[in-house]
Each structure stands twice: as C-alpha cells, then as structure tokens.
Image (cartoon, rainbow, N blue to C red):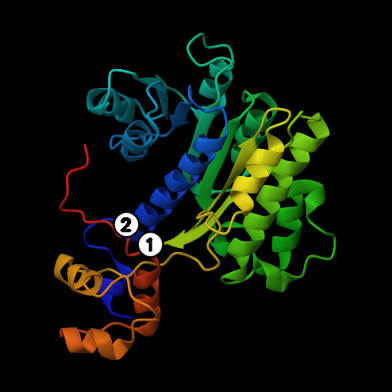
Amino acid sequence: MASFDVVNYSLRPSKSIQRQLVFEGVKKLQAQLDLDRLVYVGFGSIWFTDFVLAHKLLGVDDMVSIESNEVGYRRAVFNSPYATVRVRHGFSSAVLPSLYEDEIVRGRPWLVWLDYDKEFNADLKEDVVALVENAPTNSILLVTFNGNEMKYDKAPERPEHLKRLFGSVVPDDLPTRACKDDRMQETLADFSLQMMQSVAADLARPGGFVPAFRLIYRDVAPMVTVGGVLPARGAARIASEVVRAADWPCRPQKPIVAPHLTVREAASLQSRLPCVGRLERADVQALGFDLEDDQLEAFQAYYRHYPAYAQIVA
C-alpha cells in the first residue's frame, strides 16, 4: 500500500467524520428530549475540537475537560477556548466522581464523551459503569477506544479475555473467529453496548439505557465508539424512536475509512455531488486523477462531513 494511504499527512479525516456524525445525532436527540441545559464533559486535550462543536452546534456553555498529564493540563488551561470551560487536573476515575456533586453540573443532563486512544480495559470499564450508575437523567454517554485485536490478548485466549472484561453478556461459546480481524471491532462494539445496557438494567434505572451510537472508524488504528442515552422515566420511548429512525446517522453499516485526499481532489469530487447513483471510477479518471472503488464509495457516503483542514474552526 502506498504511504499516502497509511499516513495522513494532514490530520485524521475518518475521526473528523465520526465526530460530526456523533454531534449530528446528539442534535437530533436535543430536539426531542429535555436537553436545554446540557453540560459537556470530555477530554479536550489542547485542541478542544469537540468542545467547540458542542458550543457552536449544540449551544452548550458549561463544559468540563479532564486532563491527567501535568504539562498537558497547563497547556489545556492556556488553550481553553471559552470562559465556561473548566479544565480539571487528574485521571477520569478521580475527576468524574467529583462532578456528581458539583454545584454547576449536578442535576443537569450531561453529554459525556470519554474519547480514549487506549483499549477497553478494566479502568475504562470502571469509568463507564460509574457513569451509567451516577449520570443524571437524560444524559448521553459515549466512549471511544482502540479496537485493535492485538490489544486483547493472544488469539486463543481472546474470548476468555472478553469474558473477563464484559462479564455475562459474553457467551461461553464465543468463537475465536469473532475476535479476529475486522470482526473484532464489531464484537467489541456489541459487547460494550450490551454491558452498558446490562448495568442500567441491574440498577433499575427508571429509563434504562437506550443504545444509540455504534461507529467504527480507522485512520491508523481501528477505533470503536459506542454509547447511548440514559433517559428519564417516560423519555425512553422518545429516545428509542429518534435512534431507530431511518435518518439516524450514528450506526453506519460499514467502518468509516475516509480516503486521504488533497483539497483539490476533494473539491473536484464534491463538484459532482450529490448525484443519483454511484460515482464510478471512470468519473474520477475523467476528472484527471484516480481512486480505488472503496475510497470513492467512502467519499460519496461522507462528502458532507469530509474535513477541509485549511479552515480555522476556533
């Protein structure tokens, strides 16, 4: 494979598409649920890209960014984009519990996105379980983690590893083939969602847990994003109707693998869209360059979300 298909020399187009789909989905939920006083909690790092989207697209003011690294914390404070962003220093396992009694965010619905780059492990599970247990009603919980199969033990031991990680939602006879190659990310997405649903059911949360987000994407490592709504009693039906609608954007059938395109290539392709039917490789060649069929299919599917990195968003 050519190096320009392995290394993105600008930024991460698949991640950007995934992020926009998530916020598009949350906006649909926001239109139907009582989310006017939504609070955003996440890992803003030094870039705060998701925080800017939360503020501009969803109208969220109060936001909390968690940063464990000492230097990263100081840089995050410096780069904080709005006066209403509070950067908290520490690991998520320590900071999240302090928010449950925080005067500013207590009792308000949260949009929590734990956007990790590590694998789903015991520490991550602890954060997720605690949030399902303690997040206020009508909160939206999202978690992103590395889905590379090599992060989850050797192939023969992988089913047992997942059993220890996700508990009773993993069947005793899980075949090893479900834990290999691209199927591994599908398996991880299914079990992590089932685990969240199971925790909410065990707690008898009044509205339960409505699975809503299931996105797999790849820029370099295969990443999995899952999540759902923790609705108030009586709001579960509304949330379920929103996420089951045909236009719900947050359960794409295929992994998001955006091609690495130059600005000129993307603009040329975009000038042919939208169109009835599929763009063909011959259409691209007629424009003066070339792409693989799967790259063309991905661009046509997500051209509305394809990032233009020359644009300053903050």
**Mark 1 vs mark 2: which is more N-terminal?**
2
Query: Is disc 2 surrounded by few (<14), some (14 to 19) or many (20+) residues within 10 Å?
Result: some
Point out the residue furthest to the bottom here: 282
Q: Residue 31, image x and y in percent?
A: 50, 37
Residue 164 sits above or below residue 218 on the image: above
Q: Residue 201, image x and y in percent?
A: 80, 37
The N terminus: image quadrant: bottom left
Q: To which residue does mark 2 refer? A: 12
Spatial CA distance of label 1 from label 2 is 6 Å
Give the image quarter of residue 61.
top left
In this view, the residue in front, 136 or 92, is 136
Looking at the image, can residue 13 be seen? yes
Residue 209 sits above or below residue 67 on the image: below
**In the displayed structure, does residue 177 sit left or right of residue 91?**
right
In this view, the residue in front, 30 or 169, is 30
At a point 74% along the width and 61% down the height, the residue shown is 159
At a point 49% along the width and 41% down the height, the residue shown is 26
In this view, the residue in front, 242 or 290, is 242
Q: Amino acid at mark 1?
A: Asp
The label shown at residue 102 is: none
**In the displayed structure, does residue 192 sit left or right of residue 215?**
right
Q: Residue 197, image x and y in percent?
A: 73, 43
At a point 51% along the width and 8% down the height, the residue shown is 103
Q: Amino acid at mark 2?
A: Arg
Whether tag 1 and tag 2 are in contact, CB under 8 A, the answer is: yes
